[in-house]
Amino acid sequence: MQYSAKVMDHFANPRNVGEFNDADGVGEVGNPACGDIMRMSIKVKDNVIVDVKFKTFGCGAAIATSSISTEMIKGKTLDEALQLTNKAVAEALDGLPPAKMHCSVLAEEAIEAAIDDYLKKTTGKGLENKKQHAHDEHHEH
Ligand code: FES
């Protein structure tokens, strides 16, 4: 399987690894295709994700996608972060092998889950149907 240099870089030197003791939102998701798990913790101020950390118990592609997605959402508003698709994450890594596209879904979903958790804690209401799912290329494995 051929991985891009960017995937290898983020796998070897993952950015923003860890979690916060005082996270404003935490999202943990599992990939039903392989059983891998990803946890995203976010710190939110004035509707902006000021900091984010992740922990991934999963394959190299899952680690690389979570790493780069933390860089992509840091400093973004919650709405902007919700727009991030697994496709955009994969593109930012200069592509993933088709068989590993499903791994990039974890990052998108973990971010969503962390924002959902934050909204539930602060407003009593989560995302519910706020975001329409259009996950077309999630099942290529
Ligand atoms: S094989 Fe499980 S997330 Fe990649």
Image (tube, rainbow, N blue to C red):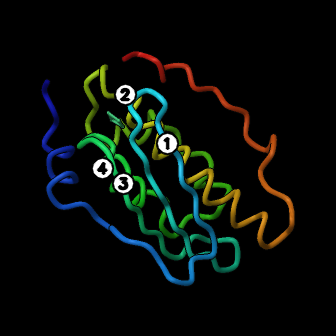
Which comes before the other along the chain, label 1 or label 3?
1
CA separation in Å, label 4 and label 2:
13 Å
CA separation in Å, label 2 and label 3:
16 Å
Ligand 1 within 8 angstroms of badge 3 C-beta: no
Residue that extends furthest to the bottom in the rendered view of this protein: 22
**Residue contact between numbered discs 3 and 4, judged by CB atoms under 8 Å:** yes
CA separation in Å, label 4 and label 1:
13 Å
| Amino acid of disc 2 | Met
Please identify, in this view, whether the residue under mark 3 or under mark 4 is nearer the observer. 3
Residue on which the image places disc 3: 56
Ligand 1 within 8 angstroms of badge 4 C-beta: no
Ligand 1 within 8 angstroms of badge 1 C-beta: no
Q: What element carries label 2?
A: helix
Q: Is mark 3 on a helix, strand or loop?
A: strand
Q: Does residue 32 sit above or below 27 in this rendering?
A: above
Q: Residue at x 55, y 54 (%)?
A: 111
Residue on which the image places disc 4: 63
Question: Toward the viewer: 77 or 60?
Answer: 60
| Amino acid of disc 1 | Gly
| Amino acid of disc 3 | Thr
Please identify, in this view, whether the residue under mark 2 or under mark 3 is nearer the observer. 3
Which comes before the other along the chain, label 2 or label 3?
3
